[in-house]
Amino acid sequence: MSDGTMRTGGVDLAAENKGTALAVIEWTPDRARLEQLSLDVDDAEITEVAAGVARLGIDCAFGWPDEFVGFVTAHADLAQPQTPDGGMAWRRTLAYRQTDRQVRERSGRWPLSVSTDRIGLTAMRCAGLLGRLAGSGLVVDRSGRDGAVVEVYPGATLRVWKWEMRGYRSDPEVRRSLVQRMRREAPWFELGARAELMVESTDAFDAVVAALAARAAATGRYDPPPAEHQERAEREGWIILPSCPLGELLHWRSTESPASATRTAR
């Protein structure tokens, strides 16, 4: 990557292969090109792509809130007194991770709760995928500081870029307008014929945004977990949000931190 070239990937993960999309972007010093955009992708293809990119952004929670894990463990231990609080404030501590709270502060919206919403099914698949990636020899750091993968959230990425995105998940015409904006703000980004798939499929569109967010992670342009939350992030996961606008993703200075090595030593 010393010559400014790299590849990043993005996955819009679903509970099944159907609804899972994968994007790969090739970056050079003067342009970026959407190299691959696929639908109905399985774990084997994701694992293969992960080995050849600087960072792979996955749109899915990498873990569950510490408080939720502790509650479920205690609830299963019938030998211990069962004294959960049960109140709303207590339930919120079980519903949201620390990274969800940080995203709420930056984007103004809560992510879906991995504990209480249906995305928990996708998170179960993601846990298996992360295990397969680690088993293939890649470094998996749920906090996103090191390794091959980062947790991303395309909707929040668009919000921090201050894009008007209302209805983009359900309306192809809204996605078409966002693709047009992408071309205006990043004229160096060559979408080619695959742009039409981004209009047709929300999953494909989100996979491309995930790969763009992965570029921000790979070039050190994001806010990592604060030191006091690092250990929690290594368990719960940490959503990477770009700290620069889309138009600045192509160029990065040598003083910025590139991605760490993604493969374990053997």
Image (tube, rainbow, N blue to C red):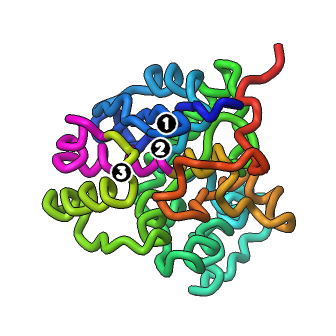
Disc 3 residue type (three-letter): Pro
Provide residue 58's location: percent of width, then percent of height: 51, 44
Which residue in the structure is indicated by mark 1?
9
Disc 1 to disc 2, C-alpha distance:
5 Å
Disc 1 residue type (three-letter): Gly
- What number is the disc on residue 211? 2
Question: Can residue 9 be seen from the camera position used here?
Answer: yes
In contact (CB < 8 Å): disc 1 and disc 2:
yes
Q: Nearer the viewer, residue 165 or 113?
A: 165
Q: Residue at x 52, y 59 (%)?
A: 114
Q: Which residues are magenta?
A: 191-212
Provide residue 128's location: percent of width, then percent of height: 56, 33
**Is residue 101 toward the left or the right of residue 261 in the image?**
left
Which residue in the structure is indicated by mark 3?
187
Q: Nearer the viewer, residue 177 or 253?
A: 253
Q: Nearer the viewer, residue 136 or 182?
A: 182
Q: Residue at x 80, y 66 (%)?
A: 226
Q: Residue at x 23, y 43 (%)?
A: 195
Disc 2 residue type (three-letter): Ala
